Amino acid sequence: MSLTSTSTLNNGVKIPWVGLGVYKVDKGEVALDTVKSALDLGYRSIDTASFYENEKEVGQAIRNSGLSREDIFVTSKVWNTEQGYEETLKAFDDSLNKLGLDYLDLYLIHWPVPGKFKDTWRALEEVYEQGKVRAIGVSNFQIHHLEDLMKDAKIKPMVDQVEFHPQLYQKDLLDFCKENEIQLEAWGPLGRSRYLDDPVLNELADKYGKSPAQVMLRWHHQHEIVIIPKSTKPHRQKENADIFEFELSEEDMRKIDELNQDKRTGKHPDEFPY
Ligand SMILES: NC(=O)C1=CN([C@@H]2O[C@H](COP(=O)(O)OP(=O)(O)OC[C@H]3O[C@@H](n4cnc5c(N)ncnc54)[C@H](OP(=O)(O)O)[C@@H]3O)[C@@H](O)[C@H]2O)C=CC1
Ligand SMILES: O=C1CO[C@H](CO)[C@@H](O)[C@@H]1O
């Protein structure tokens, strides 16, 4: 198992289990260097969004890498103010242009904007059917949003990317996604580094000879969740990728499950100020 090991989405497309997130990675040199070091270390999946304002640098770093386009999995997202059918078709083209790519691997609805996300989804179905994106999905969708979307959708979402970490163990959503063949992807898988001093995670880190961050990430992996930890630092990128060579016991998985406090670092999807 390595950074090239993948989960298979419900349409057969393969997504790496571990990718690099690039939110708050400043455009310019920082973004170029961050994506370069990740690709050099073997990362093959990058998660960006029009909202992050670094698509240009992400695309440039991918082209500079000399890797084949088909070996890299690129995700972007349509932002809230860009939602609606026509608006999303335009936003998709803008993202492709900024990235300098002729197709995306995954395009997501960033948040379930009330009254808009169904029209937005029709636009995603359209670009998917045109072959401009290999998979489509959603982000920050709760079970009720998924159920609502799937009532009218021609194509079922392949991915739901949500905030997920031990302090926000969304078991019902995870089970729902598994039942419906929707791949759950965790944003903030390190809890944005706020809970790394948790005593249970530290005790387990000592037990397995790993860092608390690696224990957290491995917990997601054993729950079959795709993760996209962000770091601008090569030594942390390396650490976050080194989670394939150890296994948490069932008892230790349960101990981490029990850390849940329904605690979010971001907004609740039903309360986001749309
Ligand atoms: N769909 C959505 O609405 C959202 C999607 N996302 C996506 O998910 C990605 C990941 O989430 P994000 O919010 O960045 O949070 P993460 O949980 O990935 O945490 C990132 C933070 O942890 C630090 N860090 C990284 N690795 C380590 C380590 N090994 N030890 C200690 N600290 C570490 C980073 O600092 P440093 O860089 O200094 O190493 C940074 O401060 C985003 O970058 C973005 O792509 C994020 C938020 C919302
Ligand atoms: O992707 C994102 C990055 O983080 C932001 C602040 O929490 C989110 O709003 C956004 O969805």
Image (tube, helix red, strand yellow):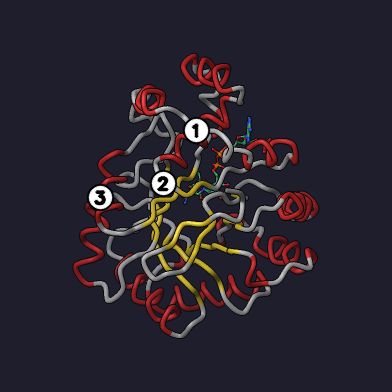
- The kind of residue on which mark 3 rests is Phe
Give the mark, 1 or 3, whose residue is nearer the N terminus: 3
Category of crowding for the residue at label 1, using alpha-carbon neighbours closer than 10 angstroms: few (below 14), some (14–19), many (at least 20): some
- Asked if labels 3 and 1 touch by Cβ distance under 8 angstroms, the answer is no
Q: Residues within 10 Å of mark 3 (few under 14, many from 20)?
A: some
- Taking the spot 49% from the left edge, 64% from the top edge, the residue there is 14
- Residue 263 location, quadrant: top left
- Asked if ligand 1 lies within 8 A of label 3, the reply is no
Q: Residue at x 63, y 46 (%)?
A: 24
Q: How many marks?
A: 3
The amino acid sitting under disc 1 is: Glu
Residue 247: numbered disc: 1
Q: Earlier in the sequence, mark 1 or mark 2?
A: 2
Amino acid bearing label 2: Glu
Q: Position of residue 229 (x, y in %)?
A: 57, 43
Residue at the spot of label 2: 224
Q: What kind of element bears circle 3? A: helix
Question: Which residue is drawn at the image coordinates 48% and 73% (left, top)?
Answer: 134
Asked which quadrant contains residue 249, the reply is top left
Element carrying mark 2: loop
Disc 3 marks which residue? 176
Q: Is residue 172 left or right of residue 67?
A: left
